[in-house]
Amino acid sequence: MALSDPRLVFGVHSCTVYNRTNSLPFGELKVLQSSSLSLEGEQIALNGGSFRFPWGVEDGNITANVELVVNEMPDFLDEIALGKAPTANAAEAAGNCSALTDKLGTVVDATTGIASVSVKTGSEADLKFTKYIVRVLDATTVDVYAMSDIDFNRGTDKVFENDSLKITASPLTIVASTAVEIPGYGIELTGGSGTINLLTAGAVNDTATFEVRPINSGSSIVTIGGANDIFPAVGLLMLAQQSGSGAMYEIDCFNVKLTGLPHPFNTKAFLEATISGQAFSDSARGGVFSKRAISI
């Protein structure tokens, strides 16, 4: 009888992350460089006297390390590796402008200050993705700054006015109950209902901030590092690439903790993040992981 063909394993197909309680998937990682389970065992040797070799060797602990090297950043990775699920937003046909929020001192005031910031109707195409700062110059005027020019070519082309990242060529005058446009950015500031005096409750150089999303097909937002964030244990289903013969190879890790999610931004390179964790025992399933292989 001839020998059987050797079982060969080639490449990586995907890694599916799933909920351990109900087995429903968080999602599937398809764009990845590797999905690996490394079983590192120790041997405990007994040495004594002048003899150079051990008198005996027994098995020690085995550590089951997991490593994923991924080139995509789906929302569920934040939940399982950083402890916080992002808020997903539906498509926004008119873009989005957050509320104006005081950062230093008092700028926002429904009567004597700036009451609100909003998208200018008809100028939605000019909305640009960045964070903005409004700075008080005197009782009735402000300058506006942007944190990045990454989206300045959307709609009306814009540039920074100077190295301070100011985007207003001239100070904007805040008028009572009237919308004042930030030219070319699709945004307007509306003054309070009374006599405008930004120094009534505030001072020169006080600031307020807001954020803008341009017209989009979807977005997400998350704040990482909360005191009550929880890192869930998950299941990982790793699959090698299907071979030319149709053979397949699968590893199912029952109970995995992943902690940390690097975000390396490198020149002219796709993001590649290495996520590390450890697999451990699942008493309900009677082990740490299972393997399935099929020959076609």
Image (cartoon, grey):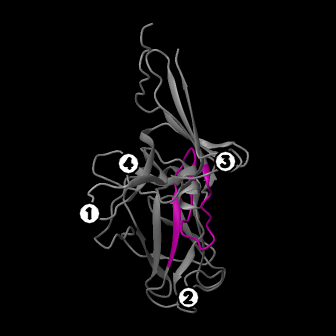
Residue at 55% across, 82% down: 107
258 vs 184, left or right, is right
Q: Which residue is mark 1?
A: 50
Q: Kindly identify which numbered label has been placed on residue 271.
A: 4
Q: Kindly identify which numbered label has been placed on residue 19.
A: 3
113 vs 267, left or right, is right
Q: Alpha-carbon distance for marks 4 and 2? A: 48 Å
Q: Earlier in the sequence, mark 1 or mark 2?
A: 1
Q: Earlier in the sequence, mark 3 or mark 4?
A: 3
SS at circle 4: loop
Above or below, comparing residue 192 to residue 243 in the picture? below
Question: Is residue 35 among what the camera can see?
Answer: yes
SS at circle 1: loop
Viewer-side label of 1, 4: 1
Q: Earlier in the sequence, mark 1 or mark 3?
A: 3
Closest to the observer, 212 or 167? 212
Above or below, comparing residue 19 to residue 186 in the picture? above
Q: Alpha-carbon distance for marks 1 and 4? A: 55 Å
Task: Pinpoint residue 79: horizontal percent, then vertical percent.
Answer: 59, 56
Q: Alpha-carbon distance for marks 2 and 3? A: 55 Å
**In terms of image quadrants, where is residue 82?**
bottom right
Q: Are marks 1 and 3 in contact (CB under 8 Å)?
A: no
Q: Earlier in the sequence, mark 2 or mark 3?
A: 3
Q: Kindly identify which numbered label has been placed on residue 197.
A: 2
